[in-house]
């Protein structure tokens, strides 16, 4: 018995399979102006080539070291999809990458993005990439390339995912690795804008499932809707901290993302040292108190899941702390002295860790 494959009335095409090349070309045309707005010295290529070219200024560095980082935005993307608001999510993607390489003293040079969609809407992709370009301008780096992939049958039509890739540079002698941190050094915290881009699986469970809020629910405690709060972009700390490093000997930095203060600060400390954090030394944004109360979330869980109001921690010598804080203030960057470095009670063989001197002062809602 023989079988034959039915012949389609018309020849099959990539578009018939769900991939629209023309729409992809239109998306590129729409976001080209965003990309050009991020150009900086060193960029040698325009968008559309097979690779982005960037020339290093070797005269600026004795021993240039490239620092790279990659990250995504996580389930914050689901909130953007629910709200059908896509102009800021690209800022988050850039922030998660450039803040990470910044902590090693690196100046971000260029960025590439990857966006995968179920069905390509040129206007939506251009809006997403516009946010990426906004983040790049904030970080002072160039958007020199990327990829938009239409993947029907893999993603639902309205769904998408994104990731980013940043490359920066630092002189070898100026790499910040925490190796010079000693007991008595001071921890300076820079405030977050809110949730930033981590802990969203728990945040969505508390706010949208357990509490039963919708993205359009307006809460006086927040001053706007739940969705608007959840889409506040991640702060980019590059420009003020690069300037600070020119003035002050910064010994270590920690980007407070997944793992919160509890997990991220020890990543920059030598073994045997402990960061002693002083709760109440910085203001806690209302969204964290709200989630802690609604979800009855244990404090240690809050501190190892969310940033709880601190997006970046800087470690300096005690004699430099006052000058560092004054300079940050002069640049318009709020900052708080949130703790100090101490010797771990068990000695130098113990892993670095964080300890808290008390409980965080969670804000209660009016009438509770």
Image: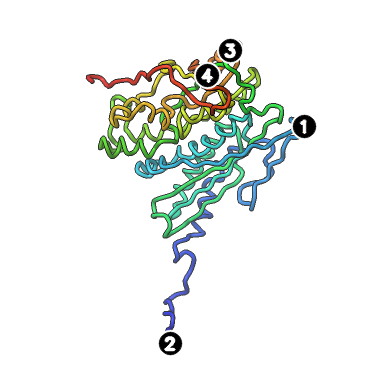
Q: Position of residue 139 (x, y in %)?
A: 57, 32
Disc number lying in front (1 or 3): 3
Q: Residues within 10 Å of mark 1 (few under 14, many from 20)?
A: few
Q: Residues within 10 Å of mark 2 (few under 14, many from 20)?
A: few
User: Is 213 rendered above or below residue 148?
Assistant: above
Q: Secondary structure at mark 3?
A: helix
Mark 3 lies on residue = 318
Q: Quadrant of residue 349?
A: top right
User: Is 30 rendered above or below residue 294?
Assistant: below
* First reached walking from the N terminus: tag 4 or tag 3: 4
Q: Residues within 10 Å of mark 3 (few under 14, many from 20)?
A: some
Q: Is residue 294 left or right of residue 311?
A: left
Residue furthest out toward the bottom: 1
Tell me whether circle 4 and circle 2 mark residues in contact (CB < 8 Å). no
Separation of residues labelled 2 and 3 (CA atoms): 84 Å
Mark 1 lies on residue = 59
Mark 2 lies on residue = 2
């Amino acid at each position: 018995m023989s079988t034959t494959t039915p012949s389609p009335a018309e020849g099959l095409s990539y578009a018939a399979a769900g991939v629209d090349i023309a729409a992809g070309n239109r998306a590129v045309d729409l976001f080209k102006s965003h990309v050009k707005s991020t150009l900086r010295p060193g960029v040698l290529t325009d968008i559309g080539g097979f690779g982005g070219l960037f020339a290093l200024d070797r005269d600026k560095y004795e021993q240039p070291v490239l620092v790279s980082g990659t990250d995504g935005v996580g389930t914050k993307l689901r909130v953007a999809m629910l709200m059908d608001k896509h102009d800021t999510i690209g800022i988050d993607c850039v922030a998660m990458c450039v803040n990470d390489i910044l902590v090693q003293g690196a100046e971000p040079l260029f960025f590439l993005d990857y966006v995968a969609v179920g069905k390509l809407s040129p206007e939506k992709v251009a809006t997403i990439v516009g946010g990426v370009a906004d983040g790049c301008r904030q970080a002072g780096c160039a958007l020199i390339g990327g990829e938009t992939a239409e993947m029907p049958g893999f993603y639902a039509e309205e769904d998408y995912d994104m990731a980013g890739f940043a490359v920066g540079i630092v002189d070898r002698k100026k790499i910040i690795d925490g190796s010079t941190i000693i007991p008595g050094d001071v921890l300076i915290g820079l405030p977050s804008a809110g949730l930033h881009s981590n802990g969203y699986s728990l945040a969505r469970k508390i706010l949208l499932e357990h509490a039963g809020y919708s993205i359009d629910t307006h809460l006086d405690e927040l001053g706007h809707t739940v969705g608007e709060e959840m889409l506040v972009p991640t702060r980019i700390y590059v420009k003020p901290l690069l300037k600070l490093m020119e003035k002050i000997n910064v010994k270590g930095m920690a980007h407070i993302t997944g793992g919160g203060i509890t997990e991220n600060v020890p990543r920059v400390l030598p073994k045997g040292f402990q960061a002693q954090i002083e709760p109440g030394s910085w203001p806690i944004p209302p969204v964290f108190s709200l989630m802690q109360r609604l979800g009855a979330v244990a404090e240690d869980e809050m501190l190892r899941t969310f940033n709880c109001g601190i997006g970046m921690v800087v470690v300096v010598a005690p004699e430099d702390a006052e000058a560092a804080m004054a300079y940050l203030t002069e640049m318009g960057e709020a900052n708080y002295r949130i703790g100090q470095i101490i010797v771990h009670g068990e000695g130098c063989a113990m892993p670095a860790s964080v300890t808290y001197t008390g409980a965080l002062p969670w804000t209660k809602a009016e009438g509770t």
